[in-house]
Every structure is written in structure tokens, then in C-alpha cells.
Image: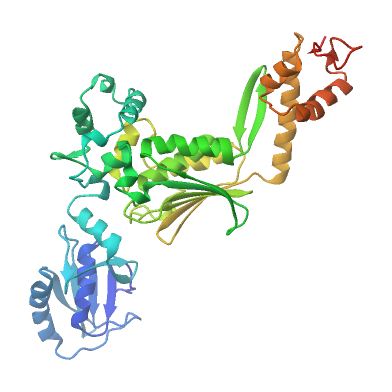
């Protein structure tokens, strides 16, 4: 007698009740499993009256109530009898009393709402983004986004730039179901996808605390454009940037690695459950950045595999395919690993991945203070060296500020110009008239 424990595929019951048909239903709708009758939670056999008769009745009962053929075995262990009911996974969805059930760990859960919709779609070989929308027409496709996609996709679809027939192009991208466009086409290329899916916008906010918000932005439009809009707003409004120079070339380094953030944003848009009323939220704090994304995880890729090599199971595979063809994602299944690697190279702690309230939470963490200060010091030194090279030929204040990317004259004078003049690193071209409008600065 094996030492049995309840799990995703095992359920133990001391006696039979017809309500346990929902457990058999859940096994069939999941990955199959075994229901044992006559065994308690401690894996001990409990004698059942008329067990031989029960073995004869159960196959017909299961078939009549569930439309399911299950294998029912009478087992013995040291002359004690128990029943094993083996249930395979089915292609078609199985219901019990008009309700659908699935296994989650050792629990049998009733499906409803979005979970039920997605379950039924999957059972019939469909995903949410693969469903047709009859009222959506070609006239609602944004041609500028199509042109943008064609430029992005020329490496992976070399002949795409020659395709001038819009319908044929969308058919090549598997965005038609018969004569109707799919949900994926609306989200990817529509002029106004929020008209059909109001929740498909994204939000960015700066938070002083978990409840106190300083500023926020709402990003609408199709997903191809949302990627760039989100990244531009983050870079220009929400994130600090450290400026450095290589010779006379100006370099900008964000406090979080740009490519890692972009990968996280694209992952969120691809894997998001758009039937969920929540939207993509990016919360920027002083010491961390958190991305909340409503999603249903695949059983094959639980959250604890996000920081390990894993297969790709996009929730919206049609959308993911278009993003791949556009060169916006690389090897499927490596997105989270790329994010981790880029953060480490950037000198940041490892980001974390959590799953709570049917949402994936990806959190980026700031550099420790000592490293921050060292970065600032290195930036100042690089700025100084670049300026010395630049001013080998005399330059005026406006030219130097433009070169450094600065706009505030008083800050430039007090923080950069004055210290360099005092250290004799820069010299005045008209030393006897320091405030002359023709004044320039040089290293000679």
C-alpha cells in the first residue's frame, strides 16, 4: 500500500458521496487524477459496507452524471479493500450539475467569471486573443501603426514591406478568423482599442508612500504604440538619469536598465488577462519600481520558475507572435531571465516576481546608497574630463551648457563653472572682464 497524500492528482475519501463527482469532474478538466474511496487523510484503509456492490455501481453513475468513462478498481491491502477511481484528462469540458470544476493543488474549485471563460476557450482550442469580433472592421485599423510594424518586422519578415494589401498582411499575421478580425488585431493595431476593451490602457504613477500619489499618467492606444509611450514617459518624467561622457560623446544611464524595463513592460502586455477589469500599473517609488499586471499563470510555468530557465506559455499567443515578428521579443521563455541579468549588470539587486490577487508583481530595486554616491562621483569626474576636451577650443556659456545638456544657467555656474575656474582647470579668454558678453572658456 503506497503512502498516499492529497495533491493536484490525488484525493482521499473515507466513504462515497455523490458530491464527490465534482472531484472527478475537476480531475477530468485538469490533468487527470485518482480518487481513492476507503482511505482516510492519514493514508489508512477504512472498511466500507457493500464495497463490492459500490464498485459495480460507480462506473455507470460516473458515466450517467458526467458523460465520462473512468476506470474503477477494487484494491486490496492485507485483506482490507479500498477503491481506486482513475480519471484521465479530457479534451472537451466536463460539467457536474451545470457547473465546471478544476483542481488547484489539493483543492477542487468551481470555475466562474473570467476563469470559466478562459477555461472553456482553452478546452476548445482557443485563447482569449484568438476570438473574432464581428463588429470590428478594417477601417478601424491604424495605418501608421501598420507602417511602424512593417519597419520593425523587416528582419524577421523580409518581404513584409512589399505587402500593400492590408487584409492580406493581417491574414499573414493570423489576425483573421474566417472573415472577421480577432481581438488580437484590435489590441495590436486599432486606432482606439479602448472603445472595445476599456481596460486595455496602462497607468504610471509616482508614489511617495503606498497610499500617497504625487503624479500619474494614463497611456491609451494600441499595444504596439503603448510600449514606446510607456518607455518615453518613464524616461522623461519618472526616472532619474545619470549623465557621463566618453570623450565628447554624452551618455545617459537610467537608474534602472532601459532594456530590462522595456522587456518587463512587453511581457506584461503580452501575458495580461484583458478580460480582467484591472489595468497594467507601474508604480515608481524612491527606492523601487513595481509593475502590476493582471494575469492567469499557466500551470506549466508557476511564479517560482520565473527566475529559472522555463518554457514559454504566453496567455495571448497571437499577440506574442506579432511582437516576436516585430523583433520586440527574442527567445520566448527568456524574458524574465534577461531582466535579471540586465539588472545585475547594471549594479542593481535582483528583481523579484510574485503572484498575488491574480496579478503578477515585478519589482525592480534601487542601487544601495554607497553605490549611488560612487556613481554620482564617477559621473561628475566624467563630465569634467569631457568638458576639458571640449574646451580645448574656446567656448562660451551657451555652447558649454548645450554640450552638457543643461538648461539652468545658475546651476551650471555654481556647480560646474565656478569650481573648475577656482581649480584652474578652465581659463577666461578675457580675464580682465569676467562678465563680458564675449567671454569664453578654454583649457589653454
Image side of residue 126 versus residue 412, left or right: left
Image side of residue 263 versus residue 61, left or right: right
Instruction: Note whether residue 311 is visible.
Output: no
Position of residue 363 measured from the top left corner of the image (x, y, whole percent): 53, 50
Image quadrant in which you'd find residue 380: top right
Instruction: Note whether residue 306 is visible.
Output: yes
Image quadrant in which you'd find residue 168: top left
Number of numbered discs visible in the structure rendering: 0
As drawn, 284 above or below 241: below
How does the figure colour the protein chain or chains? rainbow
Farthest residue toward the front?
Answer: 437
Position of residue 78 measured from the top left corner of the image (x, y, whole percent): 24, 83
Image side of residue 255 versus residue 329, left or right: right
Farthest residue toward the bottom?
Answer: 49
As drawn, 102 above or below 177: below
Image side of residue 22 versus residue 365, left or right: left
Q: Nearer the viewer, residue 416 or 73?
A: 416
Query: At 18% across and 81% down in the image, what residue appears?
Result: 18
Query: At 21% across and 54% down in the image, what residue appears?
Result: 121
Q: Nearer the viewer, residue 261 or 195?
A: 195
Position of residue 66 measured from the top left corner of the image (x, y, whole percent): 13, 71
Looking at the figure, which quarter contains the N terminus?
Answer: bottom left
Looking at the figure, which quarter contains the C terminus?
Answer: top right
Query: At 37% across and 30% down in the image, what residue appears?
Result: 327
Amino acid at each position: 500500500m503506497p503512502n498516499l497524500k492529497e495533491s493536484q492528482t490525488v484525493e482521499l475519501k473515507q466513504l462515497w458521496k455523490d458530491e464527490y463527482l465534482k472531484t472527478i469532474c475537476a480531475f477530468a478538466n485538469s490533468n487527470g487524477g485518482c480518487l481513492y474511496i476507503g482511505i482516510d487523510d492519514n493514508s489508512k484503509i477504512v472498511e466500507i459496507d457493500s464495497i463490492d456492490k459500490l464498485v459495480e455501481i460507480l462506473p455507470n453513475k460516473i458515466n450517467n452524471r458526467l458523460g465520462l468513462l473512468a476506470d474503477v478498481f477494487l484494491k486490496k491491502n492485507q485483506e482490507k479493500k479500498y477503491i481506486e477511481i482513475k480519471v484521465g484528462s479530457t479534451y472537451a469540458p466536463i460539467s457536474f450539475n451545470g457547473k465546471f470544476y478544476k483542481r488547484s493543488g489539493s483543492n477542487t474549485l468551481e470555475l466562474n467569471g473570467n476563469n470559466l471563460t478562459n477555461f472553456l476557450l482553452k478546452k476548445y482550442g482557443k485563447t482569449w486573443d484568438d476570438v473574432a469580433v464581428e463588429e470590428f472592421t478594417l477601417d478601424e485599423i491604424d495605418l501608421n501603426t501598420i507602417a511602424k510594424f512593417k519597419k520593425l518586422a523587416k528582419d524577421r519578415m523580409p518581404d513584409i514591406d512589399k505587402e500593400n494589401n492590408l487584409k492580406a498582411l493581417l491574414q499573414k499575421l493570423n489576425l483573421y478568423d474566417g472573415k472577421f478580425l480577432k481581438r488580437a488585431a484590435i489590441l495590436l493595431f486599432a486606432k482606439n482599442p479602448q472603445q472595445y476593451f476599456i481596460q486595455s490602457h496602462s497607468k504610471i504613477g509616482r508614489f511617495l508612500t503606498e497610499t500617497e500619489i504625487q503624479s500619474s499618467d494614463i497611456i491609451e492606444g494600441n499595444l504596439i504604440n503603448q510600449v514606446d509611450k510607456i518607455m518615453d514617459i518613464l524616461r522623461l518624467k519618472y526616472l532619474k538619469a545619470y549623465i557621463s561622457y566618453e570623450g565628447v560623446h554624452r551618455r545617459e544611464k537610467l537608474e534602472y536598465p532601459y532594456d530590462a524595463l522595456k522587456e518587463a513592460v512587453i511581457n506584461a502586455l503580452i501575458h495580461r488577462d484583458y478580460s480582467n477589469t484591472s489595468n497594467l500599473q507601474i508604480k515608481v517609488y524612491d527606492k523601487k519600481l513595481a509593475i502590476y499586471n493582471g494575469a492567469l499563470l499557466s500551470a506549466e510555468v508557476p511564479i517560482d520558475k520565473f527566475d529559472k530557465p522555463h518554457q514559454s506559455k504566453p496567455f495571448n499567443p497571437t499577440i506574442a507572435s506579432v511582437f516576436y515578428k516585430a523583433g520586440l521579443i527574442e527567445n520566448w521563455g527568456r524574458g524574465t531571465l534577461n531582466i535579471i541579468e540586465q539588472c545585475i549588470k547594471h549594479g542593481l539587486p535582483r528583481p523579484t516576481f510574485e503572484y498575488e490577487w491574480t496579478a503578477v508583481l515585478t519589482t525592480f530595486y534601487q542601487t544601495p546608497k554607497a553605490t549611488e554616491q560612487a556613481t554620482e562621483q564617477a559621473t561628475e569626474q566624467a563630465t569634467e574630463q569631457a568638458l576639458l576636451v571640449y574646451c580645448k577650443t574656446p567656448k562660451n556659456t551657451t555652447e558649454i551648457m548645450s554640450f552638457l545638456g543643461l538648461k539652468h544657467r545658475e546651476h551650471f555656474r555654481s556647480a560646474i563653472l565656478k569650481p573648475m575656474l577656482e581649480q584652474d582647470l578652465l581659463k577666461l579668454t578675457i580675464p580682465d572682464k569676467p562678465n563680458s558678453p564675449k567671454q569664453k572658456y578654454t583649457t589653454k
